[in-house]
């Protein structure tokens, strides 16, 4: 993966030769108060502007402010950047920036063998070592042998750089993340300008702080240049991406943009009812700032109310959306079932997180699939979609809205912590090229009252005749009691209940006729199919390709439509001798595939709170492929 | 009967009116009612239809949202739009509906269990937020639909199916709960005084903001005569206090008693005696709910039971605030989707 060619750095003054590499992964780790997320995000911006493909992975503690220097308080930000297209933020960093002993302790094991450590030696005081449970100082006891180390006095050097600005001690020390960033910019030959511009913009009103951050950034950069760090000056050439206009995007941002765009494409006003919960809160927070798009956000008293308001809005003819994470879905299930029974177009976003119960709120998992499929009383089918990349969250929102209206059904869209927080370059879509989304109830505006029956169905989609209140002579009542076919009156007859149960199931099943078939990447038939879904796309794609590079013939199919499945899926999974389903759960898709298609699928399952490891998965694929 | 009330906004500014003159039956659906014969719910249904026809509301602009319970069957019997939703959650559905469709008039029908037990949280918040929905709580002090278990308004020690030797919990007072949420409209009426009930419903309908009406409703099957001691026709005048805004708080067959402030709350004074001058005049518009709360606490047999509009104050609704935020944002900020998708910065890949 790594090619090294030595050339002299044209721009820099130091004599250190610059090496060229295809791909590099850097992890910034420090105390929550050290500004690692900020440093990482600046690095990502500089990388985007430089033209690499990249993917990021922020990882922060659930505690807002754990005690300074403690293991619980370590926050990290990983970025992988490449001259090729990449699909994961990298398994193992090549470089670890450790701002204190706790950061080193928590993240060293991830660092690749022989990797580069950038260490803030100022923070390795006996107090901090103790907080990180280090019996002796790893900087001097030989435990870091085998790594390349840059020990820099990051705190003192940053403070010295801003010495004459008259800052408080605390503010002076705070600039250390910019010093570290400057140093890493030098290591990877990044331009400082985007970050300088950002500092101007961000701290324009606090000229002293702006100046301090600028100076710390320059000082860190100069430190790299003058310390002649051997073997560490690396350049990753720009990637060849499809031409166009790009921005960085996270999954949560893409959900927000998707909702606003869907509101535009349906010409419906957006109503978003939600109760704050990590990692879905961003969606509420960002939508709340977009009132100019007619967005009505409603911070409800709980998740039940949140979905209730969204149902009310959808019933009223607005684009009714609620968003939450797994624990919130559990609370919403009764109301979601009301939307199934009343057959209303409702969008539910589930940004999954690690469970059970409160679990690990800031960690990722794909463990809500069965909950959203089956976590309701009665036979309660609904449509379930899953986004595969941060940018895909945008398009899957549009799909969710399209299907919700076409079929007059609730649709659940699954994202997760990983997608929510991971940033990647994203080609900005041209809104004028996106298809408008049809809202069938508009066509019923002047329907003849004699023709109207609330549960009369479209012959193709089985969508019922949904009409929001307000139209004269069409008054009718809906609700959670079983409905009579066609009239929608309350009905208890055995035949009717059977018929309605079948109709509700059949309606969801017919969605399969209106979604794309699943595509297979690789041989059409053969020994091994790897079948994945949702956010593991990048890791699985990478692992499959690595296994192919090692000489194995492997097919890969990825699902974004979880219910109903694409109509060719049964055929696809039966064409291979073995089917491997990697998931960040204990085998939820596998259970569905086995049950639906009687295929003896195997699993690759990690439930660690971290994204799937492409490296370990590659090993597993190779192993199965050579069995 | 027309209640004496604070100045009203013109009816057409609050209520979507029908083009033609509608009768009570125009508000009745053709669905057969399913309540037990003698149930107080019948009367409430009839008075609701009468009140709406008095106001001449456009039926297609009306939505009744209910929870679950005998009372929550109500929407089926109205020739309006409606949703019989799930237990306790009607205020949430009504909120989302009203906020996204300000042109509609949204009523919530709920029971004592529905509103104060499973849906207690939502009731507090819909009132606190002052979402413009009208909430009618049918209080029969029992769980009717599930066949007679005690409810959060059942009196301490009450023997019911689920409390064979009496309950061990104290009841909530619905009016106190509403006032604690600083609801902008709080009223009480009862099933066996059709005129008062009709007038109270009309008042609630004409309030701009969240309206809360407790309706004492007899469940003749599981909790018969829960209120008869003071609502029976022959004792009413003595035991009820019909509140009128701006009028002295007088009751008794000959209006010979009144309420005055005491050290611990309210007390009854002789309207012809030396303390007559201390008798309070009812001010429903007082911003502070303090005196309203004292009224809400008046209970039989110590005190007369207040009926009518206890509180009506005007403040902007949740929807007023939200809509004006949207209007201002649209005026001040760009709202171009293409621009939004680009975010703060983009770069060009050649
Ligand atoms: C989630 C849920 N829990 C319990 C029930 C059963 N249930 C239906 S109505 C009801 C109580 C209704 O009492 P109230 O609100 O006082 O209405 P009433 O029947 O007295 O008018 C209960 C417990 C239900 N429908 N849903
Ligand atoms: S059980 Fe009680 S509340 Fe329910 S319908 Fe019968 S009388 Fe009315
Ligand atoms: Mg009851």
Image (cartoon, grey):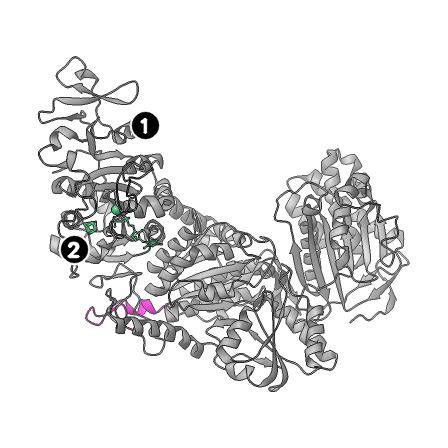
Q: Is any atom of residue B183 visible in this view?
A: no
Q: Quadrant of the C terminus of chain B?
A: bottom right
Count of all numbered marks drawn on residues in the image:
2
Q: Quadrant of the N terminus of chain B?
A: top left
* Magenta-colored span: A439-457
Q: Residue furthest front?
A: B165
Would you say residue B165 sits in the magenta stretch? no
Both marks 2 and 1 on one chain: yes
Q: Main secondary structure of the magenta part?
A: loop
The CA span between labels 2 and 1 is: 38 Å
Query: Residue B82 or A168: which is nearer the viewer?
Result: B82
Tag 1, which secondary structure?
Answer: helix
Mark 2 or mark 1: which is in front? 1
Q: Position of residue B7 (x, y in %)?
A: 22, 35
Chain ID of residue with mark 2: B
Chain ID of residue with mark 1: B
Relative to B221, is A605 above or below?
Answer: below
Describe residue A289's horizontal placement relative to residue A486 as left or right: right
Describe residue A361's horizontal placement relative to residue B325 as left or right: right
From the image, tell me which residue sits under label 2. B27
Relative to A584, is A213 above or below?
Answer: above
Describe residue A420's horizontal placement relative to residue B243 as left or right: right
Q: Residue at x 84, y 61 (%)?
A: A114
Q: Is any atom of residue A438 visible in this view?
A: yes
From the image, tell me which residue sits under label 1. B290
């Amino acid at each position: 993966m790594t090619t090294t060619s030595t050339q002299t750095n044209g721009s820099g003054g130091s004599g250190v030769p610059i090496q060229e590499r295809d791909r590099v992964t850097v992890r910034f780790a420090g105390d929550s108060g050290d500004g690692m997320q900020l440093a990482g995000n600046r690095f990502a911006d500089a990388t985007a502007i430089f033209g690499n493909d990249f993917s990021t992975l922020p990882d922060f503690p659930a505690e807002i402010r754990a005690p300074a220097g403690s293991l619980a308080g370590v926050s990290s930000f990983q970025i992988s950047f490449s001259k090729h297209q990449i699909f994961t933020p990298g398994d193992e960093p090549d470089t670890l920036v450790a701002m204190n002993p706790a950061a080193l302790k928590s993240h060293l094991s991830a660092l690749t063998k022989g990797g580069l450590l950038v260490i803030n030696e100022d923070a390795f005081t006996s107090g901090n070592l103790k907080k990180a449970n280090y019996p002796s100082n790893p900087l001097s006891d030989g435990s870091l042998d085998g790594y390349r180390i840059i020990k820099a006095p990051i705190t003192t050097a940053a403070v010295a750089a801003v010495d004459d600005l008259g800052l408080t001690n605390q503010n002076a020390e705070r600039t250390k993340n910019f010093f570290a960033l400057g140093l890493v910019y030098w290591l990877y030959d990044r331009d400082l300008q985007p970050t300088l511009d950002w500092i101007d913009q961000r701290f324009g009103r606090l000229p002293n702080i702006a100046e301090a951050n600028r100076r710390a950034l320059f000082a860190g950069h100069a430190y790299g240049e003058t310390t002649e760090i051997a073997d560490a000056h690396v350049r990753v050439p720009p990637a060849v991406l499809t031409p166009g206009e790009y921005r960085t995007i996270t999954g949560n941002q893409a959900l927000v943009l998707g909702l606003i765009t869907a509101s535009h494409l349906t010409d419906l006003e957006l109503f978003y009812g939600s109760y704050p919960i990590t990692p879905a809160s961003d969606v509420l927070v960002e939508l709340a700032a977009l009132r100019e798009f007619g967005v009505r956000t409603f911070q409800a008293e709980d998740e039940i109310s949140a979905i209730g308001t969204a149902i009310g809005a959808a019933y009223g003819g607005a684009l009714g959306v609620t968003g939450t994470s797994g624990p919130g879905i559990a609370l919403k299930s009764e109301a979601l079932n009301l939307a199934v029974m009343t057959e209303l177009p409702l969008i539910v976003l589930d940004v999954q997180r690690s469970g059970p119960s409160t679990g690990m709120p800031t960690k990722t998992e794909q463990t809500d699939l069965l909950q959203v499929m089956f976590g309701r009383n009665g036979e309660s089918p609904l449509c379930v979609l899953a986004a595969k990349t941060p940018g895909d969250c945008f398009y899957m929102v549009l799909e969710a809205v399209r299907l919700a209206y076409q079929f007059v059904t609730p649709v659940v869209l699954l994202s997760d912590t990983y997608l929510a927080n991971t940033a990647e370059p994203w080609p900005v879509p041209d809104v004028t090229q996106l298809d408008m989304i049809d809202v069938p109830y508009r066509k019923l505006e002047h329907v003849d009252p004699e023709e109207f029956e609330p549960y009369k169905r479209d012959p193709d989609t089985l969508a019922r005749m949904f009409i929001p209140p307000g139209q004269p002579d069409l008054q009718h009542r809906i609700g959670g009691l079983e409905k009579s076919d066609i009239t929608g009156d309350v009905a208890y007859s055995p035949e009717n209940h059977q018929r309605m149960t079948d109709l509700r199931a059949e309606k969801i099943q017919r969605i399969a006729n209106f979604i794309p078939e699943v595509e297979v990447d690789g041989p059409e038939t053969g020994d091994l199919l790897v079948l994945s879904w949702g956010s593991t796309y990048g890791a699985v794609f990478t692992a499959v390709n690595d296994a192919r590079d090692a000489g194995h013939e492997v097919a890969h199919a990825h699902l974004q439509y979880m219910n109903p499945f694409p109509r060719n899926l049964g055929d696809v999974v039966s064409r291979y001798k073995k089917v491997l389903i990697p998931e960040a759960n204990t085998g939820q898709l596998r259970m569905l595939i086995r049950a639906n298609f009687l295929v003896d699928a195997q699993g690759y399952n990690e439930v660690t709170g971290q994204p799937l490891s492409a490296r370990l998965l590659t090993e597993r694929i190779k192993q199965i492929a050579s069995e | 009967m027309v209640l004496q009330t604070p100045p009203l906004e013109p009816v057409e500014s609050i209520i979507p009116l029908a083009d033609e003159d509608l009768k009570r039956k125009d508000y009745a659906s053709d669905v057969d009612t399913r309540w037990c014969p003698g149930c107080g719910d019948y009367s409430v249904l009839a008075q609701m239809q009468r009140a709406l026809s008095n106001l001449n509301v456009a039926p297609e602009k009306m939505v009744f949202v209910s929870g679950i319970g005998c009372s929550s069957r109500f929407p089926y019997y109205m020739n309006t739009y409606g949703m019989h939703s799930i237990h306790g959650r009607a205020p949430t559905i009504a909120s989302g509906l009203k906020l996204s469709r300000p042109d509609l008039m949204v009523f919530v029908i709920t029971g004592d269990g529905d509103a104060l037990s499973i849906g207690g949280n939502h009731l507090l918040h819909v009132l606190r937020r002052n979402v413009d929905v009208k909430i009618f709580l049918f209080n029969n002090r029992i769980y009717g639909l599930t066949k007679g278990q005690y409810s959060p308004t059942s009196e301490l020690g009450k023997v019911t199916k689920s409390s064979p030797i009496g309950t061990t919990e104290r009841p909530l007072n619905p009016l106190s709960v509403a006032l604690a949420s600083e609801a902008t409209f709080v009223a009480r009426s009862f099933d066996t005084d059709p005129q008062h009930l009709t007038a109270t419903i009309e008042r609630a309908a004409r309030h701009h903001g969240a309206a809360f009406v407790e309706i004492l409703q007899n469940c003749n099957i599981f909790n018969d005569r829960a209120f008869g001691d003071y609502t029976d026709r022959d004792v009413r005048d003595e035991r009820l206090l019909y509140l009128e805004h701006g009028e002295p708080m007088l009751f008794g067959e000959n209006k010979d008693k009144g309420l005055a402030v005491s050290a611990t709350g309210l007390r009854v004074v002789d309207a012809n005696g030396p303390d007559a001058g201390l008798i309070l005049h009812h001010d429903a518009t007082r911003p502070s709910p303090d005196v309203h709360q004292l009224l809400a606490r008046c209970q039989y047999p110590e005190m007369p039971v207040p009926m009518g509009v206890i509180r009506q104050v005007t403040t902007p609704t949740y929807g007023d605030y939200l809509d004006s935020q949207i209007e201002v944002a649209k005026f001040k900020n760009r709202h171009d989707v293409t621009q939004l998708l680009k975010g703060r910065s983009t770069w060009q890949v050649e």
